[in-house]
Image (tube, grey):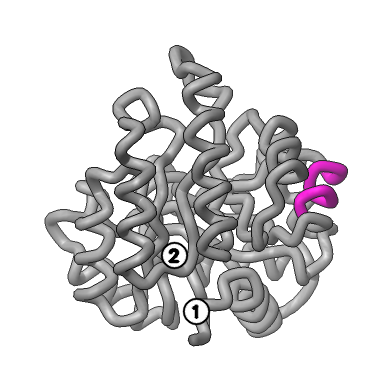
Amino acid sequence: MWIDTHCHLDAAEFAADRDAVVADAQAAGVACIVVPAVAAANFAAVKECCTHYAGCVAAYGIHPLYTPQAAEADLQTLRDCLSREPAVAIGEIGLDQFVPGLDPARQLHFFVEQLKIARDFDLPVLLHVRRAIDPILRELRRLRVRGGIAHAFNGSRQQAEQFIALGFKLGFGGAMTWPRASHLRALAAALPEEAIVLETDAPDIPPEFVGRGRNAPVFLPRIAESLAELRGVSPVDVANFTTRNACDCLPALIQ
């Protein structure tokens, strides 16, 4: 069994063939897909996906790239949503220091407030950490939460160990399959197996064998083959430990 811990199944890129996307993933052995929200405006779409498709589970949150459009009232909307709807995590939340033009203070405000919500609801978090690992770690040390996943991790070994010490798993996906991603591949090979979960971030971050095409959860087993090769283990081993790790950091998956 495979678990895709990060897939934006509600995205417009899947509008024309979402049924087939889910069916293909299930046929490939992807038994569970975590669907994170990015803004209050798409909470309903995430809920619809997770209600309609067996094996899909929701996370709700406000993504840092959507903070320019976010309103303070959206934080209460998030609380209200979590009070009504089943969720495995708060997400996708975090900081982004790669995209120009974002207000750092505004990003930080929404991140911190959502960490407080995660703490209040005793939920793990799905973290967007692009070029912002150190400030995220600083806030996680200040506002301790249940743990979660550092999505699309691409930091240093030292930063990885800091996340692990705080109770987090590290998400690896299509970026790891590109031969030029030598640093990321070395991390995937060397980190403790109990620290790693698999993800696609579909429709984004396509693996090398897809090229510039649309990513999809059906590709997760092939992505896992790359991880197996890097670690010198079998795909079955990867399926077992990544599934175990996903259930460990997202306990609602097994409830």
Which corner quadrant of the image does residue 146 belong to? bottom right
Instruction: Looking at the image, tell me whether mark 2 or mark 1 is earlier in sequence order.
Output: 2
- At x 58% / y 61%, what residue is drawn? 124
- At x 20% / y 64%, what residue is drawn? 18
Work out whether 190 lies above or below 132: below
- At x 35% / y 46%, what residue is drawn? 76
SS label for mark 2? helix
Image location (x, y in percent) of residue 101: 44, 13
Work out whether 44 lies above or below 32: above
Q: Which amino acid, mark 2?
A: Phe
* 89 in the magenta segment: no
Left of 72 or right of it: where is 197? right
Secondary structure mostly seen in the magenta stretch: helix
Range of magenta residues: 157-163
Image location (x, y in percent) of residue 102: 46, 18
- Closer to the camera in the image, 14 or 245: 245
Residue 144 seen in this snapshot: yes
Image location (x, y in percent) of residue 54: 29, 81
Left of 178 or right of it: where is 91? left
Task: Specify few, some or many for label 2: CA neighbours under 10 Å numbering under 14, 14-19, or 20 or more.
Answer: many
Left of 72 or right of it: where is 145? right
- Closer to the camera in the image, 131 or 205: 131
Work out whether 174 lies above or below 27: above
Q: Which amino acid, mark 1?
A: Leu
Residue 218 seen in this snapshot: no
SS label for mark 1? helix
Which corner quadrant of the image does residue 240 belong to? bottom right
Name the residue that disc number 2 marks.
Answer: 219
Image location (x, y in percent) of residue 130: 59, 34
Work out whether 213 lies above or below 60: above
Name the residue that disc number 1 marks.
Answer: 253
Cα separation between marks 2 and 1 = 21 Å
